Image: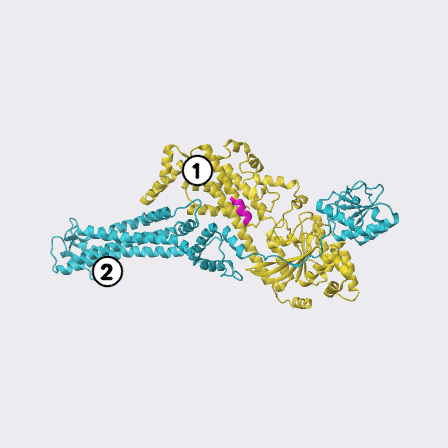
Amino acid sequence: MPLSFTQQLNAEQLRAIEDIQGVEPVPAVASVGLDFPTWLVRRNAELSKREPLRQMLQHAPGIFFRLFLAAVLLAILAGVVTSIKALGSAGTQLNIFWVLGVLLGLSWLSLLLWLATLLLNRDNAGVLAPLFRKLLDRILPARREPSAQQAADRVWLQRLLFSSSGYLRLGWITHGIWSAYLLGGLLGLLLLFATRQFDFVWESTLLGGDSFVAITGALTPPLAAIGVPVPDAGQILTSSLDQTPVNAAQTRRVWAIFLLGCVLIYGLLPRLLMGLICVLAERRAQSRQTLDLNQPYYIRLQREFWPQSSRPRVLDADDQPAAPLPTGGKAGQLPANCQWFGLELPAQFSLPAATPPDFINLRDEASRRNALAAIKAQRGAVALLVDGNKAADRGLQRVVMELAEVAGARNLWLVLRPQAAEAKHQSWLQAAARAGLTPEQVTFL
Amino acid sequence: MNTERSTEFMNATLSLPLMLAVVGHTNTGKTSLLRTLLRNAEFGEVRDSAGTTRHVEAAQLLLHGEACIELRDTPGLEDSIALAAQLKNVQQQGLRGRASLEHFIAQTQPEIAREFEQEIKVLRQALECHALLYVIDCREEVLEKYREEIATLSLASRPILPVLNFIQADAQNLQNWRTELAELGLHALVEFDTVAFDFSAEKRLYQKLQTLLEAWYQPLQQLLDERAREWQQVRSACIAQVAQLLVDMATYTLPAEAHSVQANELQNTVRQREQQCLRTVLELLNFSSSDVQLTNLPVQNGEWELDLFAPETLKKFGLDAASAAAAGAAIGAGVDLMLAGLSLGAASLTGAAIGTAWHTGRRYGRDLLARWRGEKILCVDDTTLNILLLRQLFLLRHLFRRGHAAVNPLQMERNPLQVGKKPQVENKEQNQLPDGWPRQQQKMRELLQLKAGKESRNYQQVLRECETWLGQII
């Protein structure tokens, strides 16, 4: 199951916290029968409800939200103040197109700047949002040895502001603040228009009335479409500085609505639209992000809650007491003129010089029978050459016992080659003891 | 109960967990096989001696928390010839196959039962389990006693999958074993070295079981898929750790004020960071740093034995020790960031956008100031980065092929292929800095010039590229 972005963010924040605080068990969510991502999501959902984890997770988004809200409120205030300042001090006559330029020009200039910087340097587009990010970066700085809270905050910042979708968030922050500013401007205008009476005029040295009719005509269709009364050609022409409109009150009202409508449609609306596009694009970009489950934390979690194997248990215990360890004595001197035999010697075994070329290597039933017959025939000292790299198992022990029985326990010598390591030497001493041989009869070459 | 199980098996009805008895002659590596399959280095006891395991111990392989396979570790068969003789007596009473084993276990006299206690434990498991994994030490020659073991175990009428262990020791013996097993009708077998781990061998083991135990095909496939995913995940996680170490150290800087003191601090940081990476990698691969002594690897108790900056280390990895020592212990080369800073700044300025210029100005302003004041910064030099890379590659290559049963250095030494020859071959390989490294290094150094922090996308991108590159060369 792929995780949604919110789930990924939640998981990463919890990872940051638990990497520092240690993993918390969540017994309410059983792991049996679930795949890891499903389990992780359920566990994290459960975990995120707990205090103080819930608060820790909400810390960074809380700061972000408060900061954004403050910026928006400030922008609204700025908008109101600017519009009132710009218009309030101008007297009773307002130059329509000049006011329009003042109200929309800056917004459009900054919008173009934002678009231009977006193409040049995506991650630092605009001026406002990088400042906003810088501020957050200062409030929640990266630290060398962060606390759990700081680490969780940093993860939030990283995933939302510094990641590949970060520029889109910066985008909607920018447009959000500008929208607020324009909204403030709109409110200021409304306030002014509601409480004061302005005469709207246009003036020009170079341009004639036709130009202003054309400009107004180009701006009005969206306004007309939503049913707002727009200035007609007569009203426009008579609004020239040197003329007086026939129906002055009516013209004033139409112009005021025209101004408000223009700010709404050409100022606020594009910003809101851009903001919306950024929000949607951010969602899209976020949905393409993946959670890196190869991080040690997730592997640790899997191991802890999803063991690859169960605890071992003993099914059939060993209730025989361990055989007493034989006490090793000093190896004795091998008598001369021994009859030589080998016990399961491998093909590449380096034989000592004493062994005759036709000595019998006991490997199977047939060779064992041959060896027993040869011992019976000769009745002398028997040297049994064994591989010191091997330990004596019970099968080999039995063969030694059989040889000892036929040759006589005093006549059989075990010759280890090479000298065996401690544990293996012990096993041969044990074999010798079981066959009735003394430790002296275990020697090495 | 046994007859029930028998019919269940014949009808091939699925029941989980699938029970597998791990059987074989004594000291062939049965417990080691379990350790590796269970990914648990603490299971049972492993010693190079006969009869180390004397009881039957079981553990389950879990899939999504549910038991999928139960592996049962049994004592070694030690005296199959005498056991075969006893069974022949039973068979003379007209009993065959499973019945003969059941009768032998139930009816045998106390002294014989005591003598064959271990073998009886094995036979009981052979009767109870769905299939047998017969572990063979391929260093041993094919002997009659092994044939008897297989013959006895086949009486349980369960599929037997021979697992050839210690396969690297002797090619001739391995071939003999294959021939012998074919003669005994055991054609499905698997080469699985419990010491030199190879995931593809584990995969083959499960695949062979799938053909032998068709009814369990699906759960075995699921387990196989899950194990493959886990292995891939752990592998990538280790590679990611090393990539992080490299990028982190390539971009680490300190202001060079009092040169000697700072250089020491830089060295210590590199050392600590490398040890931290080593510990994480060991943990990820489930090697406990405390009790695993890593043979053939200069790592002990989870720490590198050779210091990163010791001249021997450089020599061991075939780097020029003299030049490194001359460079003030291979560290502290001041990197003049100014040129790069300026050219990049100029490039951005051509964009002529106010925001970008403002940002660029902020970014390089401090560098300009530092330049003006004559300050320099310290960063980890190329020789140190090279040796970090070589050491980590050496470590990963080693650990990825290391079974969880590998605790015994003797087994390595015994291996004729590895004694004397191998280290030289490895050294030669190590001396070579892998292709593409200069390119990677350059990209990391560019981060340093860009002053891209760990959270930046540039940094993350270089990190991803480094991971991919490491994944390819390992």
Instruction: Report whether A258 appears left or right of A47.
Output: left
Q: Quadrant of the C terminus of chain A?
A: top right
Regarding mark 2 in the picture, which secondary structure is present there? helix
Q: x, y percentage for residue A105?
A: 24, 50
The percent coordinates of residue A289 (x first, y second) are 44, 54
The tag on residue A223 is 2
From the image, state the color of chain B.
Answer: yellow
In this view, the residue in front, B84 or B471, is B84
Query: What residue would you read off at disc 1?
Result: B254
- x, y percent for residue B218: 58, 62
The residue depicted at 15 percent of the width and 59 percent of the height is: A251
Position of B348 compared to B465: left or right?
Answer: left
Q: Position of residue A76 (x, y in %)?
A: 26, 54
Give the residues in magenta.
B276-283
**Chain A representation colour:** cyan
Say few, some or many: other residues with alpha carbon within 10 Å of mark 2 (under 14 / 14 to 19 / 20 or more). some
The answer to which image quadrant residue B445 occupies is top left
For the residues labelled 2 and 1, say whether their Cβ atoms are less than 8 Å apart: no
What separation in Å lies between label 2 and label 1 (alpha carbons)? Answer: 61 Å
- The kind of secondary structure the magenta stretch mainly shows is helix
Disc 2 chain ID: A
Q: Residues within 10 Å of mark 1 (few under 14, many from 20)?
A: some
Identify the amino acid type marked 1: Leu
Label 1 sits on a secondary structure element that is: strand
Tell me the kind of residue under disc 2: Leu
Residue at left 36%, top 54%? Answer: A62
